[in-house]
Image (cartoon, rainbow, N blue to C red):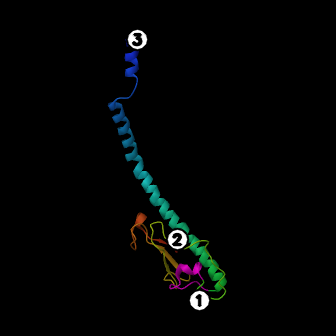
Amino acid sequence: MRTTRRNEKRGARGITLIEMLVVLAIIALFASLVAPRLLNKTDTARVTAARAQINAFMTALGSYKLDTGVYPVTEAGLQALRVKPGNVNNWQGPYLPQEIPVDPWGRPYAYKYPSDQGDEPEIVCLGADGQPGGEGINADIVSWKSQ
């Protein structure tokens, strides 16, 4: 009777190599189905973050203009929201609580005023590829379109 129990315990001690391979195959299959969807969500989140940041810049620029009467010129750039330009009166900043961030892909936002788009300044994020134009996640994210 003792030998039978000893043999039963040996068989119940672990899992086989085949069982481990089946589990790994299931995990790999799951990862191959889920990973592309998660990566797509990160790209969408970056686009959304860039739009939100541009909106925050536009709000801060509106406050800047209310105080000074003009938008910062291209040469002063978005940094004028943090540091008073030398030739501006009534600057009540800083208009942003922290340093000017880079876009979600690690590049600076492009700022232009006077603008080609009318009376408001232009702020542009070049998207994932860092090149003008593009489609999808490579499309430019601009201040004059709400998209």
Report x, y in % for residue 112: 50, 82
Q: Quadrant of the N terminus?
A: top left
Kindly identify which residue carries mark 2: 101
Q: CA distance from mark 3 to mark 2?
A: 72 Å
Q: Is residue 77 magenta?
A: yes
User: Can you say whether 63 is above or below 137 in the image?
Assistant: below
Kindly identify which residue carries mark 1: 86
Kindly identify which residue carries mark 3: 2
Residue at 37%, 47% (x, y): give it: 32
- Lower sequence index among marks 1 and 2: 1
Residue at 61%, 88% (x, y): give it: 88
Front position in the image: 1 or 80: 1
Magenta segment? 70-83
Mark 3 touches mark 1? (CB < 8 Å):
no
Asked if residue 139 lies left or right of residue 77, the reply is: left
Q: Is residue 48 magenta?
A: no
Asked if residue 13 lies left or right of residue 62, the reply is: left
